[in-house]
Each structure stands twice: as C-alpha cells, then as structure tokens.
Image (cartoon, rainbow, N blue to C red):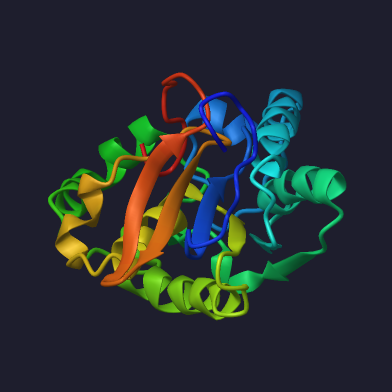
C-alpha cells in the first residue's frame, strides 16, 4: 500500500507472512497467564479484531491460517468475513502450554515461582509451570507457518493468527536468532501484528507490533 492508502502492484515484492495476535480477553485484562486455556474474546477484543481486519484486508492476503483456540479463531473469522478466504485451523499454532502457571495472575506467578520466572526472563531454557520450552513451541509452530507460506504465489501474503508467545518464538526461529535472544523481540499488543518478508538471505523482520498507536502489552508475553 502506498503512503496515500492506494493498493500498489505486488509484483517483485516476494512472499510476506503477517503474524497477527488475537484480540483482548478477560484474562488479558486480569493479567492471568492463559497459555493453552481456551479463553474467549471480550466485546473490546471483538471490536479490535474487526478494526484490524479492515486494515489487513486492504493488504489483499492470499491465505489465512489460525490457532484453533477460540480467541485466535474468532479473530481470524473477522478477516475471513471481509476477504472471503477460508481459515485453516492448526493446533500447533496454540499458545505455549504453561502447566500450573495457567490461570494465575502475573503477581501470583512471581510470588509462587519467582526463581523460575526470573530464569525465564534471563533467557534460560525453562519449563514454565512444568509446561513447554520456548524452543518446543517454535519446533511445532514454525514448520506449520513455513508449510503454508510455501503454498503462496511468488508475491503472496499469508496471515497467521496466533498468540503473543507463539508468534515471538516463531519469528525468532524464522529469523535464525538463538533462543536466548528471542526475548529481545518485544511482545505484541492485542490485535497487532508483525510482518516478515522473504529476501535473498531468508526471512526478514519488516514490521513489529504494527497496527495501532503504542498500547500496553496485556498477556502472557508482557
């Protein structure tokens, strides 16, 4: 899209992957760790999804793939309604399973599992709450994203609707960053997205946390 808002010719641009985080949930507002818990969107979250979908539809995506958790699936449905595209739901795009952390508030996690939390923030390989390692999340999610991206036309655009932690680990993997540095990628606000472009040397980060004026990151990846 040009600076004037007009859709420009896509020829020669290369493939793009838009990684779009779901809209707001009640657990986001309460700062409860969701992980793989299936929490639905709030009314605010639905509104966020509809607004963002109008912007993303203008980019003329060729395919939509989504986590099968309802907060992501219902976000994806708003874009599907505007574009007429079908949504492919993938279990491997779910958020990190975090065991006993799930359902706890940020403060409760620090109070009960402070050493584990601190180790995670230092970039150490930690099974938060006895759940998945970040590298295991990337192991399941990144191949799914690449498989769908490979189906695109030469200048096609794939929209991936997922979760903050899963998106961050997937971006880190696709950029070839060491896992200990994935934390350097800041979290995504609800219904914001990041854009990867396929270049001569592989995938490049073109935009990060795009879609609105800066807002607080409410969720598991804050």
Residue 118 spot, x, y in % from top left: 16, 46
Q: Position of residue 215 (x, y in %)?
A: 44, 21
Residue 220 in the image, given as x and y percentages of width and height: 43, 43
* Residue displayed at 34% across by 41% down: 109
The answer to which quarter of the image holds residue 39 is: top right
Residue 160 percent across, percent down from the top left? 59, 58
Specify whether residue 188 is in view.
no
* Left-right relation of 123 to 164: left
The residue located at (49%, 62%) in the rendering is 12
* On-image quarter of the C terminus: top left
Left or right: where does residue 43 sit relative to residue 162?
right
Answer above or below: position of 42 versus 66. above
Q: Tell me the residue at 81%/51% (across/down).
A: 80
Q: Observer-nearest residue: 173 or 15?
A: 15
The answer to whether residue 8 is above or below residue 126 is above
150 sits left or right of 51 in the view: left
Q: Nearer the viewer, residue 3 or 136?
A: 3
């Amino acid at each position: 899209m040009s600076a004037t808002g007009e859709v420009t010719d896509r020829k020669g641009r290369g493939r793009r992957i838009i990684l779009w985080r779901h809209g707001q949930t009640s657990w986001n507002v309460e700062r409860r760790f969701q992980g793989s818990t299936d929490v639905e969107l709030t009314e605010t979250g639905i509104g966020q999804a509809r607004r963002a979908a109008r912007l993303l539809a203008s980019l003329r995506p060729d395919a939509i793939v989504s986590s099968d958790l309802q907060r992501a699936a219902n976000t994806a449905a708003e874009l599907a309604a505007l574009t007429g595209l079908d949504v492919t739901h993938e279990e491997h795009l779910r958020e990190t399973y975090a065991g006993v952390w799930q359902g706890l508030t940020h403060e409760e996690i620090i109070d009960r599992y402070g050493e584990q939390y601190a180790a995670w923030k230092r970039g150490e390989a930690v099974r938060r709450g006895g759940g998945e390692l970040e590298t295991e999340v990337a192991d399941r999610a990144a191949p799914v994203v690449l498989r769908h991206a490979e189906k695109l036309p030469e200048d096609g655009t794939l929209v991936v609707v997922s979760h903050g932690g899963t998106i961050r680990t997937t971006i880190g993997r696709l950029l070839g960053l060491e896992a200990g540095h994935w934390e350097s990628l800041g979290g995504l606000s609800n219904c914001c997205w990041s854009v990867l472009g396929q270049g001569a040397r592989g995938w490049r980060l073109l935009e990060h946390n795009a879609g609105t004026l800066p807002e607080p990151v409410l969720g598991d990846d804050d």
